[in-house]
Image (cartoon, rainbow, N blue to C red):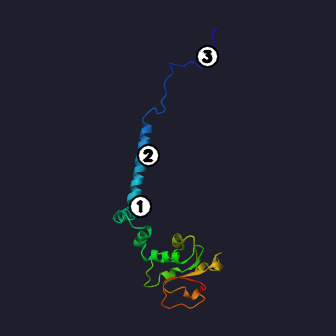
C-alpha cells in the first residue's frame, strides 16, 4: 500500500499574484526619496547653525589641526579660547580636585575692560573645572555645597570681599583660599 503525502500538491495552474500589481509603489518610493533629499537640502543650506558647524567649526578646526599637527591639547585650547581658557586652566591648577569654588557672577565677568567673554556660564566653566564644584553667589542660600566653599575665584577684582583676610588691591584675576593657609 502506498503512503499518502500529507503535503498538499502544488497548484501549477494557479495565477501568480504580484505584491505590486502596477508601478504605484515605485512612484511612491521615488516621491519620498525626492522629499527626503529636498528636506536635507533645505536643512543644510537654509539653517545658519549647520553653516556655522560645517564652515567655521569643522573646516576651521581641520585647518588648525593641519597647520599645527604637533601642538598639545592645552596649546590648541589656548589658541581657540585665549584668556578664557588661561583663567580656567589657572583655577584648575591652583585648586585641588575636591575644591568647592565660589564662582563670580556674570556682572563680574562683564565689567567694562574685562578680558573675559563667555566663561560666566556655570555649566561652561564646570566643563573645564570638573571634578571641582562651583557655587554662584546667587546660589549661596540654596546650594548644598554653600557651606563647603573653600576657594573664591576673583575676576576683575570682584570676590575679594568674600575672603576672611585682606588682599592686595592690585590682585584682579585668580583664585584664593577662603581662609588663609598657614
Q: Earlier in the sequence, mark 1 or mark 2?
A: 2
Distance (Cα) linking label 3 and label 1: 66 Å
Check the image and report above or below for 88 versus 64. Answer: below
> Of helix, strand and loop, which one carries label 1?
helix
Residue 14, which numbered label? none
Furthest residue in direction left, as rendered: 67
Q: Where is residue 153 in the image (x, y as percent from the top left)?
A: 54, 81
Residue at the (40%, 58%) spot, across then down: 44
The residue wearing badge 1 is: 50
SS of the residue under disc 2: helix
Q: Which of 54 and 71 is in front in this view?
A: 71
Does any portion of residue 106 appear in the rendered image? yes
Could you tell me if the residues under marks 3 and 2 are in contact, i.e. CB atoms within 8 Å? Answer: no
Residue ID for mark 2: 32
User: How far, Cα to Cα, is label 1 from label 2?
Assistant: 23 Å
Q: Depth check: 95 or 116 in front?
A: 95
Q: Mark 3 points at which residue?
A: 5
- Say above or below: 69 vs 26: below
- The residue lying at 48 percent from left, 30 percent from top is 18
Position of 69 with respect to 121 (left or right) is left
Amino acid at each position: 500500500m502506498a503512503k499518502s503525502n500529507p503535503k498538499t500538491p502544488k497548484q501549477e495552474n494557479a495565477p501568480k499574484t504580484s505584491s505590486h500589481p502596477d508601478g504605484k509603489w515605485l512612484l511612491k518610493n521615488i516621491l519620498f526619496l525626492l522629499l527626503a533629499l529636498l528636506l536635507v537640502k533645505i536643512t543644510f543650506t537654509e539653517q545658519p547653525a549647520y553653516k556655522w558647524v560645517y564652515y567655521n567649526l569643522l573646516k576651521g578646526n581641520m585647518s588648525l589641526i593641519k597647520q599645527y599637527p604637533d601642538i598639545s591639547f592645552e596649546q590648541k585650547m589656548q589658541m581657540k579660547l585665549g584668556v578664557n581658557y588661561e583663567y580656567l586652566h589657572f583655577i584648575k591648577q591652583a585648586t585641588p580636585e575636591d575644591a568647592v569654588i565660589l564662582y563670580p557672577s556674570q556682572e563680574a565677568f562683564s565689567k567694562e575692560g574685562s578680558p573675559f567673554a563667555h566663561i560666566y556660564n556655570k555649566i561652561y566653566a564646570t566643563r573645564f573645572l570638573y571634578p571641582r564644584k562651583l557655587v554662584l553667589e546667587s546660589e549661596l542660600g540654596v546650594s548644598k555645597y554653600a557651606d563647603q566653599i573653600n576657594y573664591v575665584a576673583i575676576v576683575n577684582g570682584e570676590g575679594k570681599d568674600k575672603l576672611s583676610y585682606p588682599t592686595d588691591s592690585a590682585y584682579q584675576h585668580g583664585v584664593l583660599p577662603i581662609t588663609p593657609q598657614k
